[in-house]
Image (cartoon, rainbow, N blue to C red):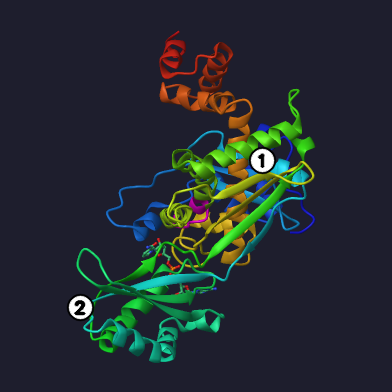
Amino acid sequence: MSGKSSRLPGFYRLSLAERANLVGEWAGLEPAEIELLAGQGLRNEQANAMIENVVGTYELPLGIAANFLINGRDYLIPMVVEEPSVVAAISNAARLIRAGGGFHTSATDPIMIGQIQVLDVPDMAAALNALAAHKEALLERANCCDKLMVKLGGGARDLEFRPFANSPVGPMLVVHLLFDVRDAMGANAINTCVEDLAPIVADLTGGRTNLRILSNLADRRTATAWGIVPAAALEKDGMNGREVAQWIAEANAFAVIDPYRATTHNKGIMNGIDAVCLATGNDWRAIEAGAHAYAARNGRYTALTDWHVNENGDLYGEITLPMAVGIVGGATKAHPVAKVALKILGVQSASELGQIMAAVGLAQNLAAIKALATTGIQKGHMRLHARQVAMAAGASGAQIQQIADQMVAEKRIHIERARELLHN
Ligand code: NAD
């Protein structure tokens, strides 16, 4: 796969079938896999086996973001999203970071946390001593729950004991199991383990266990991405690149200090990350929950990113966030299009996927705050949004683009105008 460029100039001008074929060739997809991209990906009987009370399937657009260079390797990024301008914006931002050498990423080990809630502990100090004394035995027992994961190099890593002197129901002890889940998201493995350990924990503490469940605050399983945009790459329409870099740093600072801004700032990041989660069959609610909790980990909700002007006058950006994603388990191998999306990405591990998602989040954020700090978000967004407005008004076929173009030319992009144009 190395040596292939993800720069795809003119990709957006191709027909849908041409794009699918080009991506298929790029990623070495089988003809049947290319067909899955453009046809009905998830069949009814497959959907019926995935959840309960199925009555059908619900389609969303699958787009491909271009220009990603991550740790010296080119990636095409499959994204499932209903919001216009996300895929275009992220491809543009990836091109800017590419001009500075691309993204650089890293990740911690894929360690998830399982929680056991213990109540009615008669003597907290004695309970903590008993748990500490039996830590190795508990870890060994946890390793029996998913022998395959252990064989693959994962398994129980540590136990943490968190006494709470007060809660709305009195004192409480929370036991954390830290478990390396390798290439899985890990929820099922963790839940199995903590359910298995709970009776032993109850015996050792003399208490009563209640909840036994994964924590979605996966702060031991983070991915980091950073990159540089040369100031010269930010020069546009007479705007000075160094100045634009400074405005972007100011936009980030706004989100660092103000939760009202940080929420929207981080939502933009998740526009990108959720879309890759959906495309790859990952649990985007888990990633959302983890990201926002992590953003508030120091007691005040803040930006997930840092953007500042570096000593050369260029723009430096970095993001770190929990990344509980898998390439085995869940829907990743059950949804036929998710399997194709993973093949397009060509990832070898869940860690690699998580690092790509961190880069995607950073790119999406750059696109958003660059637009906000320069032309404003609406100029580019509304142009792309116009087609969806035309469709909402009832346009179909060639009418969609005609009405969208007309509304853009008139700078009147709203549904009433689309309806008028349709009826005329
Ligand atoms: P899973 O249980 O379907 O698959 C993981 C299994 O794959 C492991 O038990 C392991 O034995 C096997 N495996 C094979 N190769 C592996 C490798 N290389 N690395 C690791 N394991 C390997 O999936 P999961 O990841 O445990 O659970 C994910 C699902 O759980 C998602 O669908 C998620 O929505 C759901 N879930 C989430 C929560 C939550 O977020 N709070 C709670 C419950 C369930």
Q: Which mark is residue 276?
A: none
Q: In the rendered structure, which disc, 2 or 1, sits on the residue that comes first in sequence?
A: 1
Give the quadrant of ligand 1: bottom left
Say which element carries label 1: helix
Residue 278 is a magenta residue: yes
Q: Is residue 394 above or below residue 68?
A: above
Residue linked to disc 2: 120
Q: Is residue 247 left or right of residue 264?
A: right
Magenta stretch: give its range. 277-283
Q: Which residue is depicted at the point 77% across and 41% down? A: 313
Q: Nearer the viewer, residue 158 or 387?
A: 158
Q: Residue at x 58, y 49 (%)?
A: 305
Can residue 15 be seen at all in this image of the molecule? no
Kind of residue at badge 1:
Ala
Extreme residue in the top direction = 424
Frontmost residue, 320 versus 94: 320
Q: Badge 1 is on which residue?
A: 93
